[in-house]
Image (cartoon, grey):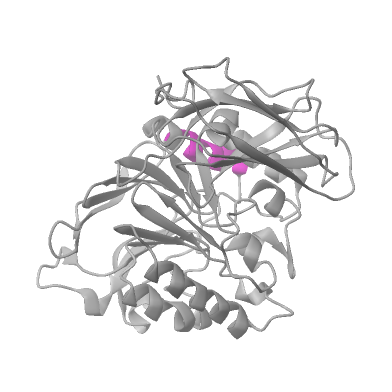
Amino acid sequence: MSRFAAHRALALVGTTLLALTTAATTAPTAAATTTPERVLLSPTADPSTSQTLTWRSDTPDHPTLRIAPATDPGQVTTVEGTTTSSVNGTFHTATATGLSPDTAYRYRVGDGTSFSPWRTFTTAAQGTEPFTFLYFGDVQNGISTGGATMVRAALEAEPDAELAVHSGDLVNSANSESEWSQWFDAFGPEATGTINHIAAPGNHEYSLFSLSRYWSPQFPGVGNGPASGRHLSQTVYHTDYQGVRFVVLNSNYRNAAPLSADLWLDTQQRWLEEALATNPHPWTVVTFHHPVFSNSPSRDNGPLRESWLDTLEEYDVDLVLQGHDHSYGRGNLTANRTEDPDVQTGPVYTVAVTGTKMYDASEDNWIDNGAEVRAQVADTPTFQAVEVEGASLRYTARTADGTVVDSFTIDKSGDKNVTDTL
């Protein structure tokens, strides 16, 4: 039985202290729906003891989260909150704290009268327990057709995935109600409402210099990003999950006005250095939208590379997951080659696309900037599954029919090595 049809029912026995807070995000509007919709799980800084939920409804009154341990469904905690209206309905946010690690919880959200169905999520375990997460490049185009096909193939192939990482351009038009509806439909309410979604904004989540009105209500972030900088406190953060620190950056330096691109990037670089230096876990995954090494022959993100690359290399980040170039690519700095042609050291940089828009792929920008390509393919949408277990991380990129496009393993049992396994 898949995680999305009936989420894990295992839970630790014991009483749970729940401290629940609610918030709302606002803007003028029209009604969304009678029943709460777009229920989505977003991680907190510590998903082993807390969980954030967001949802939308057609009423600004009495937002309510009801939650109970799955093994004791009668032990329900109810919280009433306050909201104001937002784009095309009212978005609400609720965060449950004081949860027990590795424990299943039933929950539903509503206004005290109309509620979403009961669904279940499981808190992260403490420590380096094995788990699988999914990584999606730009869903953006053909969301209800090609994008949805890829997403559903991923969920079917990895029914026990506990997280989904999105490297930007979830939609094509930042403020399109229909495209955001298609994105939620592609994943379905079980996938959005039972696993955590870690999302970085792409350039298509911006309208000129304005972040999508839908972004923060749906992806509120963690709140531990840079204290200053337009949009950065909403879109830059890190969360720790079972031995992995996931770091989200905002690479949209061309949309940074009134900040300069240098200030936008350097503010994040200083914050990134601190996030990596204080990481207590063995693994680090960083995601943002624009690649430091572009797959597209006509593209280059020099300012981003100049600001962030040395930090990513210095702290030996394990995976750097990117999008934007609408093709698949994976590589590393040439300096990180070993005598074995199938083995490298240092960070792995990937570029992926999930939707239907495709660009040509070229090694030029990699080679021109001291890197090498180990796998590259155009006209091929993919999804990626990453399995983390102890000192080993296995990454596999597949097409909708299950064809493996790329795979490698990172082994930290001795000297860190990255081995091609395709």
Residue 301 or residue 115, whichever sits in front: 115
Lateral position of residue 118 relative to residue 214, left or right: left
The overriding secondary structure of the stretch rendered in magenta is: helix
Asked if the magenta segment contains residue 145, the reply would be: yes
- Extreme residue in the left direction: 339
Lateral position of residue 356 relative to residue 112, left or right: left
Q: In which quarter of the view is residue 226 placed? A: bottom right
Q: Is residue 102 above or below residue 180?
A: above
Magenta residue span: 143-153
Question: Can residue 291 be seen in this snapshot?
Answer: yes
- x, y percent for residue 200: 56, 58
Residue 18 or residue 299, whichever sits in front: 18
Q: In this view, does 111 lie above or below 201?
A: above
Q: Residue at x 36, y 83 (%)?
A: 368
- x, y percent for residue 243: 33, 51
Q: In which quarter of the view is residue 275 placed? A: bottom left
- x, y percent for residue 81: 77, 37
